[in-house]
Amino acid sequence: MDYSSVNALRANEVEVMRQILHVDMDAYYASVEQHDRPELRGKPVIVGGPSKRGIVCAASYEARPFGVRSAMPMVEAMRKCPEGIVVAPRHARYAEVSRSIFGIFRRYTPLVEGLSLDEAFLDVTGSQRLFGRGEEIARQIKDAIRAETGLTASAGVAHCKFVAKIASDLRKPDGLVVVPDDVAAFLAPLPVERMWGIGPKTAKRVRDAGYSTIGDLARADAQHLEYLLGSWGAYINQLARGQDDRDVIADGDAKSIGAEETFEQDLTDRASMEHYLLAQSARVASRLVREELVARCVSVKIKYSDFTAVSRQLTLREAVCDTDSIFHAARELLSRIPIAGKRVRLTGVSMSDFAQASAPQSLFPDERIVRGRAIETATQALRDRFGKQGVTRAALLEPEDETIANLHPHTRAPRT
């Protein structure tokens, strides 16, 4: 596709109303699992960690009538839906399918702003002479996703991001909603909970003040909303009227690659924390190698049992992609974080400040780093051939003490 022609069309057709799509995959993680495992189709699937502290990542549409929702504690989800089939998340698989989906988006416009693995805004204003109106483009994208991935998506078509986001959620699953020209009339009857950014607590405050619909917020005095909601009250008033001039910001490269875990039992000693930092360093290194990247900035995140979090970061002299280098830095960063007498419920490692692994990193490279990179690359090749259990560090096979042996981590998605 010739993106320059799309941008030229967009620039030359100022009289054409802006066309923004919001495309959102339906129950994404659960749908991927049902697609890959036919025996799960039509059954209540709950994707998430099975531990006491596990969190629901996604619930299939069969599980939702029971009240199961994303971000719900797994204990509550299983109480609501005892027949639910719990499936451990496979983040690498979800990322793989996501790349295919975003590839479809970019066939129609270079202006794609990803919000997560499974949803994005698309500005197709300049694509209309090539592919038709926004509704036609949305339909083509939905058809392509179904044909190429076996999954369904819902889409909203509007003149701005806020309204497109609301529209995409109105007829899930497999929905397509085109917002009419009278945007205010479209928004007016919708409940305040449909407002992007208004959660349950804020919604109660808004309803207690006498505003039950988006139309009520549109007609409200902006100063009163500021008093009620703080500095963003006036902005809510504008959005409720369908006034949103934010541009779709095309995605750049990933800013970080990381891995983190929440533990069923709090960690209380440094050895346990280092054990998991090593495992996380290995996962980050594996992904760096797969994506042919090296990175210089290492970050470690710790969350205490009271949910307060602290992080530290370190910039290395030379970019790395091997487990040992990342773990060495992570251990140093851990020594800078107060852990004595603390109970830790989460640890995480991430890397940023990327470069291509094939590019020369230094005139006189550190031989240890070069050797580590070669070992990591060879190790990844063995994993690709024989599976992830084909090559495993001894330190990760044998926990150092009984405390570690009794832990069951819930792995969260790598952040990008």
Image: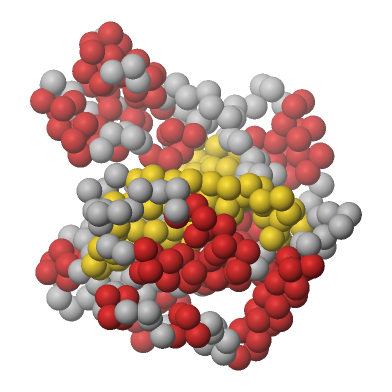
User: Taking the image as drawn, is residue 392 in sight?
Assistant: yes
Task: In the rendered view, tell whether residue 2 sits above or below residue 92.
Answer: above
Q: Compare residues 328 and 303 and report the one nearer the observer.
A: 328
Q: Compare residues 7 and 33 and report the one nearer the observer.
A: 33
Task: In the rendered view, tell whether residue 110 sits above or below residue 151.
Answer: above
Q: Residue at x 89, y 54 (%)?
A: 363
Q: Is residue 194 left or right of residue 279?
A: left
| Quadrant of residue 371 within the rendered picture | bottom right
| Quadrant of residue 263 within the rendered picture | bottom left
Q: Is residue 101 left or right of residue 126?
A: left
Task: In the rendered view, tell whether residue 354 sits above or below residue 150.
Answer: above
User: Taking the image as drawn, is residue 241 in sight?
Assistant: no
Task: In the rendered view, tell whether residue 273 sits above or below residue 392.
Answer: above
Q: Residue at x 13, y 21 (%)?
A: 210
Q: Is residue 83 left or right of residue 126?
A: left
- Total marks in image: 0
Q: Residue at x 60, y 69 (%)?
A: 323
What x and y, as percent, mark residue 14? 69, 22
Q: Residue at x 53, y 84 (%)?
A: 392
What x and y, as percent, mark residue 290? 67, 70
The colour scheme used to paint the residues is secondary structure
